[in-house]
Amino acid sequence: MSETVQPLLEVNGLKKYFPIKSGLFSRTVGQVKAVDDISFSIRKGETFGLVGESGSGKSTVGKTILRLTDKTDGTVTFKGIDLHTLQPEELRKLRPQMQLIFQDPYSSLNPRVRIGDAIGEALLDHGLVPQAEVRDRVLEVLEACGLSSYHIDRFPHEFSGGQRQRVGIARALALDPELIIADEPVSALDVSIQAQIINLFRKMQDTKGLTYLFISHDLSVVEHLCSRIGVMYLGSMMETAPRDELFRNPLHPYTKALLSAVPIPIPKLKRERIVLSGELPSPANPPAGCKFHTRCPFAVARCKEEKPEFRHVGSDHYVACHLV
């Protein structure tokens, strides 16, 4: 995709296949195509939402971008640097600039380590702050994330779910990153707490100019936070567009089905509910042609035989569908 401004993050033709082993000698007998040739870019200071059903490959995209798992093919470019060509020491120097916020921060925190130490250890490990200044830096980010100074000496089990998510955000922000990949950061929280965390994301973006890749299955959350949205299905990108354009004029049948499930705040308004038939196919044996054709109510013979091109249809709007 062409951009008038050099994007902060650019993903081109990214693939991540996991081998299926079988037999006495663990021979590779197949591959799970978790991420299958997707492309998108994120401009500095914007929030790009990545949505889709569970099992669509969203989280794998985030982990592959950060090289927590190696790619199978494609390129991931951050600030013009191909991340998958870097040597370990070169990549380590870039790590503070790219941070991940987990869906369940409690499982990512050591239950025996106090919060202050959990946040401060990365600062020391990367040599970003002298030992004598670590506590002050940790207190600063805790306050920015809506936590109090006395929280610094508490253990993870002493926090509520919303507070633990704030700790996860604080741990990422402590390194002063440019890019944050947030993997389902509010899905396990109550609605009122979700609103607080979303407002915190916005505040941090306004004050620090952060760039987000926001991974979620909840389109109502994505609508409030993201400026552009990508829709994934079975490892492939079905559609990308600016938020308002996507909600006003969805083109792919899968996008339309997802949007039809979003609750409407005004009860008098009605929206036709599109219920997809069948189950999500296995990524180890995806359908030929368009991957969505087995569940698409509008599929034609061409959809079963030919993979649709991911093409530009105007207004920074891209779609992979023969019917558009």
Image: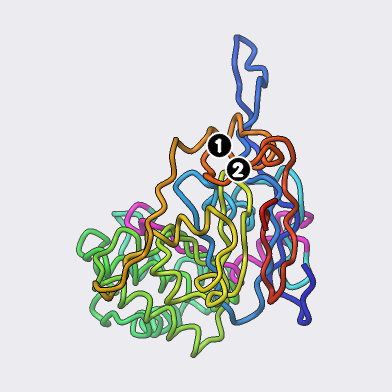
- Crowd class of label 1 (few under 14; some 14 to 19; many from 20; radius 10 Å): some
Q: Position of residue 15 (x, y in %)?
A: 69, 46
Can residue 109 be seen here? The reply is: no
For residue 225, what is the image quadrant?
bottom left
Residue at the spot 46% in from the left edge and 55% down from the top edge: 257
Q: Position of residue 122 (x, y in %)?
A: 50, 67
Quadrant containing the N terminus is bottom right
What's the magenta region?
82-107
Can residue 126 be seen here? The reply is: yes
| Amino acid identity at mark 2 | Ala
Farthest residue toward the top? 24
- Is residue 249 or residue 222 the one in the foreground? 249
| Amino acid identity at mark 1 | Thr
- Is residue 276 or residue 270 the one in the foreground? 270
The secondary structure type at the circle numbered 2 is loop
The residue carrying mark 1 is 294
- Is residue 306 or residue 52 the one in the foreground? 306
Q: Is residue 1 above or below residue 200?
A: above
The secondary structure type at the circle numbered 1 is loop
Residue at the spot 43% in from the left edge and 65% down from the top edge: 219
Marks 1/2 in contact by CB < 8 Å: the verdict is: yes
Magenta-highlighted stretch: main secondary structure? helix
Is residue 99 a member of the stretch shown in magenta? yes
Q: Position of residue 40 (x, y in %)?
A: 68, 63
User: Which numbered tag is attached to residue 179?
Assistant: none
Q: CA distance from mark 1 to mark 2?
A: 8 Å
Q: Which is more foreground, mark 1 or mark 2? A: 2
Q: Which tag, 1 or 2, sits closer to the chain's start?
A: 1
Q: Position of residue 129 (x, y in %)?
A: 53, 79
User: Which numbered tag is attached to residue 299?
Assistant: 2
